[in-house]
Amino acid sequence: MDPKRELTSVDLAALVTELNRYEGAKVDKAYLYGDDLLRFRMRDFDRGRVELILEVGDTKRAHVADPEHVPDAPGRPPNFAMMLRNRLSGADFAGVEQFEFDRILVFEFERDDENTRIVVELFGQGNVAVLDETGEVVQSLETVRLKSRTVAPGAQYEFPSSRLDPLTVGYEAFVRNMDDSDTDVVRTLATQLNLGGLYAEEVCTRAGVEKTMPIEDAGEEEYRALHDAIDDLRTRLRSGEIDPRVYTDDDGAVVDATPFPLKEHEREGLDSEAYDSFNGALDAYFYRLEIEEESEAEEPGSTRPDFEAEIEKKKRIIDQQEGAIEGFEQQAETERRRAELLYAKYDLVDEVLSTVREARESGVPWDEIRETLDAGAQQGIPAAEAVVDVDGAEGTVTIELDGTDVEVDVEDGVEKNADRLYTEAKRIEGKKEGALAAIENTREELAAVKTRRDEWEAEDEDDEGETEAEDEDDEEEFADRDWLEMESIPIRSSEEWYERFRWFHTSDGFLVIGGRNADQNEEIVTKYLNKHDLFFHTQAHGGPVTIVKATGPSEPSEEVEFPESTKEEAAQFAVSYSSTWKEGRYAGEAYMVTPDQVSKTPESGEYIEKGSFVIRGDRTYFRDVAAEVAIGVQCEGQTRVLGGPPSAIEERVATSVRVQPGRYAQNDAAKMLYREFKERFADQSFLRKVASPDKIQEFLPPGGSEVVDG
């Protein structure tokens, strides 16, 4: 498990209660380290010296630190630090609050001549903005200019768009947001309810609800249990009844700090240490994390920059940004559909609005309006039947239109309500444009890292001739080694172009790639399918486009004779990573065609979805193909996780486990495999770096899994 580097919204909700206990502390001095870490030295009447740390770079944190843990004062202070000293020297700390349920903290400082707010953005690229009493930006670490918001000196500070706060959402609104999803329970809690991955899993565990349960299968019993679990979380956070923990792995390395014990971490077998305060837990966690990373960096042979780790980090950021873009597209489309439904059902919506508005103008209470509508629904009045909720506090009515709930403001007409929804769709699309700009920046940064890596490796080429014979001797020596018993396994890795797709090499040495989603399916066919390759797909809907490559993308296309074993393994790969696995079936059917049979041109009057294709001509079928994969750890040559058809994987790895469709969610199955491998390998450090649960999960099929041999 990779160590936590960013505080969650739940962390911040717990943190602000403790930070506000320092209200009244006076600011002595402010320091800026690099371009992302701020330190405020303050004096508290009761507690003495107080060191507030705010970091918004790769690590994103906010907490009070032990004076022994703060870095030495830097040299000449930069302009940003001087500006802070001028504004805050002698100021009183007046409190801090979390903006809605976002990863944003707003610190208030008061002084006789001027008040200052400091907004700390602990998400995305991170930022700190210093505001005057009018909310105007005095200075910020980063300047942000997007269609959705601006953060720049001289401009009014603009918070990001509001997000749903799961800690305050009522049951009816909770149900509406859950029902708006088309995925499973845990992902809906993580995204629609903004709980994030870890706490979404924790809520499911505490509620006793299966994480992978599709939303359409969840009913009132599950919804009530989940909402109660969230309500319990809210009570703990608001009351300050916390029990902070720092979690460590089997090697004693820190991996997380939380405001209270998590059942998810207990299931992972992590050790925990209790702390008196969450501030203390966070301080200890990040201090130890820094020491551990410095220790790793000082290990012999580690003078080469860890380009691979930096590349992986940039890739993870791109994946997150792509996920956000997809979410924005879905949100915008949802709002636009709601607006269109208002016009499509104009007369019905107008009747509901007019009825409620006239009742309010006559002084009828909201509760009585709700009762009248309920009675009308029982009598079969269409307008009353369409009303699913009345919110007197907000002055809104929620109407069901063609299976979609649409909330409308009673004071506005149909047109104004529809216009509001269209405007919201445009605003969300603006966020998408900002995310697209951000992803381009990250891609440029990724390209720069790769360039630096290539330059570093080019400098070492002159030395390769001298060491080649030694390397060959090493390989012969390692060939007969018992990898599982070795105390220290050397890590050898390189990045290949196909590793962002699903992939494996057949037992005959041919590369097979498959798409992880519709976009990758499209890309594989349009960019990587050559005339001598083979195309595989399943009869089941929702499978990856699977290509057996005859040659590499930069090599001239050549006709080859593919062995039957390669074709059978490609068919098993296509079946195993398709909806066959998700549906819990142990076998499926796949077919094979040549590239000239694959087309994006539909018949007249037909439509092809993104990632789909038209297949023309005869197909070669592979029937009753087993849905089964092997996941293993490769030690010879490259060191990495491998996954795919057992016959192709098991001979390439030091150890492996076979997996079939089953009851354990993908992330839970990955953790189970990781624990199994931990029992087999003596070198736990090697395993943690090469085969963490996250890396294992990349090779597991989507859906539930079960280990069939250990």
Image (cartoon, grey):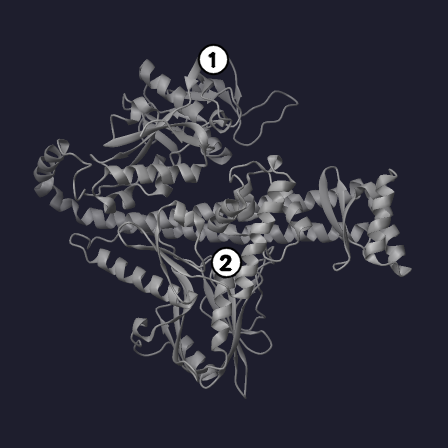
Q: Is residue 504 among the parts visible in the rendering?
A: yes
Residue on which the image places disc 1: 619
Q: Dot 2: few (<14), some (14–19), or many (≥20) neighbours within 10 Å?
A: many
Q: Quadrant of the C terminus?
A: top left
Q: Is residue 180 among the parts visible in the rendering?
A: no
Q: Please name the residue shown 59% across and 44% down the image.
A: 329
Q: Which mark is residue 10?
A: 2
Question: Which-is-in-front pick, marks 2 and 1?
Answer: 2
Residue 536: quadrant of the picture: top left
Which amino acid type corresponds to the residue marked 2 in the rendered image? Val
Q: Position of residue 285 (x, y in %)?
A: 35, 61
- Could you tell me how far apart the alpha carbons at marks 2 and 1 are, in whole angstroms? 53 Å
Please determine whether, in this image, residue 148 is positioned above or below residue 45: above
In the rendered structure, the answer to whether residue 201 lies left or right of residue 301 reads right
Q: Position of residue 337 (x, y in %)?
A: 70, 42
Q: Dot 1: few (<14), some (14–19), or many (≥20) neighbours within 10 Å?
A: some
Q: Position of residue 60 (x, y in %)?
A: 41, 61
Residue 334: quadrant of the picture: top right
Residue 84: quadrant of the picture: bottom left
Q: Please name the residue shown 51% across and 69% down the image.
A: 17
Whichever of labels 2 and 1 marks the residue nearer the N terminus, that label is 2
Proximity of marks 2 and 1: CB atoms separated by less than 8 Å:
no
Q: Secondary structure at mark 1?
A: loop
In the rendered structure, the answer to whether residue 200 lies left or right of residue 606 reads left
In the rendered structure, the answer to whether residue 596 lies left or right of residue 70 reads right
Q: Please name the residue shown 47% across and 13% down the image.
A: 619
Q: Nearer the viewer, residue 463 or 565?
A: 565
Q: Secondary structure at mark 2?
A: helix
Q: Nearer the viewer, residue 353 or 225?
A: 225
Please determine whether, in this image, residue 324 is positioned above or below residue 218: below
